[in-house]
Image (cartoon, rainbow, N blue to C red):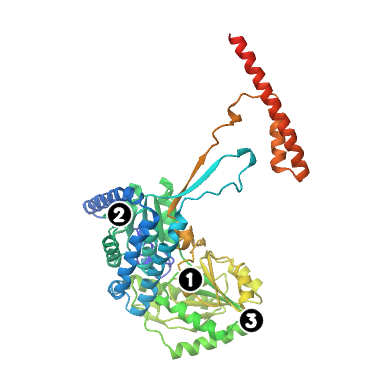
Amino acid sequence: MTPDSPATHKTSLEPEAGSPSLSTDPAWAEHTPSSSNPIKASGLESEVHEQLAAARSAQQAWAEWTPRARCCVLRALRETLAGNPLGIASECGRGDVVETMTAEILPLLDACRFLEVEAPRILAERSPGRRGRPKWLWGTRLALRNEPVGVALIIGPSNYPLMLPGIQALQALAAGNGVLLKPAPGCSQPLRSLASIVEAAGLPRGLVQILPEQPHAATTAIERGVDKVFVTGSRATGRALAQQLAGSVTPSVMELSGCDAVFVQDDADPALVSACLLFGARLNQGRTCLAPRRVFARDQMVDRICSILRQDMRQHPQKGLGGTTQPSSHARGTLRRAAHVIDEAVRAGATLVAGDVQVVDGHRELRSLAIVDRVRSEMKLAQEDLFAPVVSFIRIASMEQALLENAKCPFALGASVFGHPQRSRDLARRVQAGCVVVNDMVVPAADPRVPLAGRKMSGHGTTRGEAGLLEMTQTKAIVTARRWFKPHLQPRAPQDAALVAQLIALEHGASPLRRFRSSLRLISLALSSRRSRTSHGAMDHEDGS
């Protein structure tokens, strides 16, 4: 099981006309040993069982390290990676070395430094003091601890095989967890290199385990009892994973598909919007979760942007879409799916402004960035998690209408807003998305402080940033009671009902005067209650004697 084992990451895996290979999710093709060679499956299960046991054993000692001591290991890892970034970049399987360095290595190093600086503070035990404590619980002390979850299973994608699972693994380690890393098919090597470097930096041996690439490895790990699962993948992968996790009630964080919206206001710079769309849609050949898919703008702005886009695409043509980190058969299936949905939209009234769709081996296949105008929100093109470079323009009369149209999409991962900075920030607060970038696209979200939190069909939970680190922990509350005065342990007295009523008035009375009067009555009733209990105690003593 891997969310992005080729055709699974960020692309719809539901059956479609003309593409039967996408009707099943290869990440979940194996759910039981009987689905493949029984002997081979049995051997894999034994291997995964041993890896889980090793990680759990090493984690018990690692959890006793202070967060600052753990981060010293991460610092050594960062310095080693920074000394030879080309070495591990060459193992990521992407032809463009510059893009690999900026998209895989640099964000990973930035995330590591963020943890070195911030993790000790975030993970430190804290006490809220007296603030928020009810008056009737005076003397009670509260300490809050963020403790490791245990062993985390991280299911890595194929589009960013090092950066995405690597950042989650570093956060899991900083929080004191053991880690099982499940690579996408063909993506093991960079994660193995990362594990070797971090062990050389001082990580306890066995704490990080690289599972086999076979889908059954992840399902076996879940069955054997990992403590939390982190997955980056498609909507179909999320659904399948949720079904398996339901039986054991294993918690999870899912960063699933996106169909990101772009809101372009009338005062936006169309040249900037065009440049950002071109960059965002072409990044990693369209195989990026935070990529522009739907653009909302008024007629005149759409015309200006499309005109500039056509010119920019002619001046800077894109290389063919064949060379991705995915195995070619699955990449081509994704591109055929994109062509099918584009054709469907055109038949329904949309216009293909730019883009190359060719017939390859009897199937229509997208061969370059596609710009589609006059798309409607109800069209499949604006409803699906296509993992290909396709940008749809949805013409609107106002930003109010844009917000309503955007809400029709089942995905809500990221978005961008272009225009006057203050008005754009105001609009961003109303956009249904986990991350909204103002006057740019994709790159600012690489800030290691930025959390990614999908909404709706884009998943649940948070990765990256402070919130992502806390997802790797479980909260423990330590409550220390006052040493004396425990009236709840005393026998009931006739005045108790009135006493509690005055206590409520003291805590929650509408005016200071009412609370003051309640305090006086409360003191009087408390003294009366104490005398009553004392007299009853004396009578009981006499009866007993």
Indicate the quadrant containing the N terminus: top left, top right, bottom left or bottom right: bottom left
Asked if disc 1 and disc 3 are in contact, CB closer than 8 Å, the reply is: no
Indicate the quadrant containing the C terminus: top left, top right, bottom left or bottom right: top right
Q: Position of residue 352 (x, y in %)?
A: 50, 82
Q: Position of residue 37 (x, y in %)?
A: 23, 54
Residues 189 and 411: in front is 189
Question: Please, is residue 153 above or below residue 139 in the view?
Answer: below
Element under disc 1: helix
For mark 1, what is the residue? 445
Q: Residues within 10 Å of mark 1 (few under 14, many from 20)?
A: some
Residue type at mark 1: give it: Ala
Asked if disc 2 and disc 3 are in contact, CB closer than 8 Å, the reply is: no
Residues 530 and 101: in front is 530
Q: Residue at x 43, y 65 (%)?
A: 114
What is the distance, in whole Å, between disc 1 and disc 2 at their CAs?
30 Å
What is the distance, in whole Å, between disc 1 and disc 3 at their CAs?
24 Å
Q: Quadrant of residue 540?
A: top right
Element under disc 2: loop
Whichever of labels 1 and 2 marks the residue nearer the N terminus, that label is 2
Q: Is residue 264 left or right of residue 80?
A: right
For mark 3, what is the residue? 266
Whichever of labels 1 and 3 marks the residue nearer the N terminus, that label is 3
- Dot label at residue 262: none
For mark 2, what is the residue? 207
Q: Residues within 10 Å of mark 2 (few under 14, many from 20)?
A: many
Q: How many marks?
A: 3
What is the distance, in whole Å, between disc 2 and disc 3 at their CAs?
53 Å
Q: Residue at x 48, y 64 (%)?
A: 452
Residue type at mark 3: give it: Asp
Can residue 119 be seen in this snapshot? Answer: yes
Q: Residues within 10 Å of mark 3 (few under 14, many from 20)?
A: some
Element under disc 3: loop
